[in-house]
């Protein structure tokens, strides 16, 4: 048990707890719900076993699905995001991303914004498309993906802003 | 052989991802098929406890509403008591002519998690196997139908809400025998759809819709809602009716579970009849 393991376990529990008790109960205009729990996947350390990372993401999604009675939609969205995360990091931070990642939350750079925005969009698209799964509701799907993503992105930056401040 | 091992070790992440993807897609499609129990649901000890604790806190915000509802219900009960010789309004659940005492048992339960903004909504209640809750019990409150019990654990149970695109509840127009099926199109939490009502039926805006007597889950004459709009199509002999629910499904906290005492007998008889 080292510091990183403890930090990640805590992050898992705290994010799931707040997602289930607070964020899942937010329905702006009846349909906008933010999912900032994916911060766990976004901030997961880079230099670790990718298999373990996939399995943790799977568990994260499964826990959310159990709480939401939603079958496997969160699980699918989470492992998809976990699988493509490396490519997203390369795309937004360039090939030397592993050095940048050490201070990912230090300042809100344009690279960080690209990383978070693309991640949230991918996760929410998979999640909402699978959740509704009906071409009849295509406009509602699009509207919910866009509005929920905006809300999630704002909340994620708010949380990043909150957790980085004590280190200064 | 060596090449296979090499291939597996080289693509191990991808293969693991595919494996997990298959598992999660399986879990997803399971919920999309009609009336199939979920493998993982919130009627377990961990999520049940979390929802119960949070509900203990948030419940205080609705105490006033809940008190009003109970007072209204008490008033109606008293009205029956004092006028017990009369037959009360047909939209009322505990009609003396239904003989609830003989055929149906009622339990009280508290909702600890409500959901209404999805297409397939489930509620979680406190009360499970150990409290006598069984699968396929009907769930109502003082205003009308809420849903049907879906999964049961020792202390908690999940309810398939009336606001679930897979829910089908038999219903009829009050005071007639024109039966149809209540479904939900997934759009508005205040309205459900009543389909398969023949065009022969006389319909008016504001008619009340109640549960039909042909299901083993709900007794007859439990209120559902009022006729709001009637849609007709030239190609079909049936109406599609938009029904405004009596219940505000976004604001419910206390429910009754209905157990049909004779359900076993009925099901056995039906099975025998089919097998003959």
Image (spheres, coloured by chain):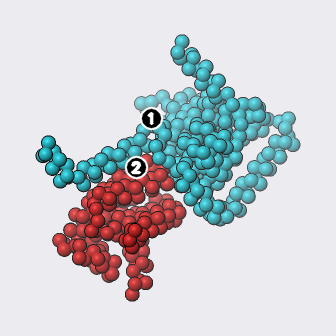
Chain colours: A red, B cyan
Badge 1 sits on which subunit? B
- Are both tags, 1 and 2, on one chain? no
On the rendered structure, is B92 left or right of A77?
right
Q: Quadrant of the N terminus of chain A?
A: bottom left
* Residue, disc 2: A72
Question: Which residue of the protein is positioned furthest toward the left in this rendering?
Answer: B3
Vertical comparison of B188 with A6: above or below? above
Res B269 seen here: yes
Q: Quadrant of residue A74?
A: bottom left
* Residue, disc 1: B233
Residue drawn at the location 56% of the way across and 46% of the way down: B158
Badge 2 sits on which subunit? A
Question: What kind of element bears circle 2?
Answer: loop
Vertical comparison of A78 with A117: above or below? above
Mark 1 or mark 2: which is in front?
Answer: 2
Residue B119 point in image, percent of width and height: 46, 49
- For label 2, count other residues whose C-alpha is less than 10 Å away and answer few (under 14), some (14-19) or many (20+): many
On the rendered structure, is A30 left or right of B29?
right
Residue drawn at the location 43% of the way across and 47% of the way down: A71
Q: Marks 1 and 2, Cα distance to the nearest angstrom? A: 37 Å
Residue drawn at the location 56% of the way across and 59% of the way down: B50
Vertical comparison of B195 with A127: above or below? above
On the rendered structure, is B152 left or right of B76?
left
Residue B275 point in image, percent of width and height: 52, 15
Residue B45 point in image, percent of width and height: 56, 52
Question: Which residue of the protein is positioned furthest toward the bottom in this rendering?
Answer: A168
Q: Quadrant of the C terminus of chain A?
A: bottom left
């Amino acid at each position: 048990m080292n510091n990183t393991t403890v930090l990640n376990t805590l992050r898992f529990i705290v994010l799931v707890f707040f997602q289930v008790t607070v964020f899942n109960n937010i329905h702006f205009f009846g349909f906008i719900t933010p999912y900032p729990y994916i911060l766990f996947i976004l901030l997961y350390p880079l230099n670790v076993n990718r298999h373990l990372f996939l399995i943790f993401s799977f568990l994260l999604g499964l826990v959310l699905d159990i709480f939401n009675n939603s079958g496997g939609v969160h699980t699918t969205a989470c492992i998809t995001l976990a699988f493509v995360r490396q490519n997203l990091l390369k795309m937004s931070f360039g090939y030397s991303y592993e050095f940048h990642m050490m201070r990912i939350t230090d300042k809100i750079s344009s690279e960080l914004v690209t990383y978070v925005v693309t991640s949230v969009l991918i996760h929410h698209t998979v999640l909402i498309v699978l959740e509704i799964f009906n071409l009849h509701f295509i406009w509602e799907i699009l509207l919910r993906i866009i509005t929920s993503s905006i809300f999630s992105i704002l909340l994620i930056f708010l949380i990043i802003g909150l957790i980085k401040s004590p280190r200064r | 052989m060596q090449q296979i091992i090499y291939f597996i070790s080289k693509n191990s992440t991808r293969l693991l991802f595919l494996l997990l993807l298959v598992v999660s897609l399986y879990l997803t499609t399971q919920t999309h098929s009609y009336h199939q129990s979920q493998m993982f649901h919130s009627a377990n000890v961990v999520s049940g406890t979390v929802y119960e604790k949070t509900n203990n806190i948030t419940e205080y915000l609705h105490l006033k509403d809940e008190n009003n509802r109970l007072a209204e219900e008490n008033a109606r009960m008293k009205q029956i008591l004092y006028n017990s010789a009369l037959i009360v309004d047909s939209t009322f659940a505990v009609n003396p002519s239904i003989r609830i005492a003989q055929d149906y048992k009622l339990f009280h339960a508290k909702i600890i998690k409500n959901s209404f903004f999805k297409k397939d909504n489930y509620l979680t209640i406190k009360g499970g196997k150990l409290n006598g809750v069984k699968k396929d019990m009907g769930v109502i409150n003082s205003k009308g139908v809420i849903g049907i019990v879906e999964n049961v654990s020792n202390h908690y149970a999940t309810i398939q809400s009336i606001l679930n695109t897979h829910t089908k509840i038999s219903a009829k127009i009050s005071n007639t025998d024109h039966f149809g099926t209540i479904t939900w199109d997934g759009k508005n939490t205040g309205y459900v759809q009543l389909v398969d009502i023949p065009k022969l039926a006389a319909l008016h805006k504001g008619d009340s819709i109640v549960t039909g007597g042909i299901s083993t889950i709900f007794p007859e004459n439990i209120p559902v809602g009022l006729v709001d709009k009637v849609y007709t199509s030239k190609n079909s002999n049936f109406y599609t009716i938009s029904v405004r629910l009596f219940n505000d499904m976004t604001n419910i906290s206390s429910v009754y579970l209905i157990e049909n005492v004779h359900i076993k007998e009925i099901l056995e008889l039906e099975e025998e009849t089919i097998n003959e």
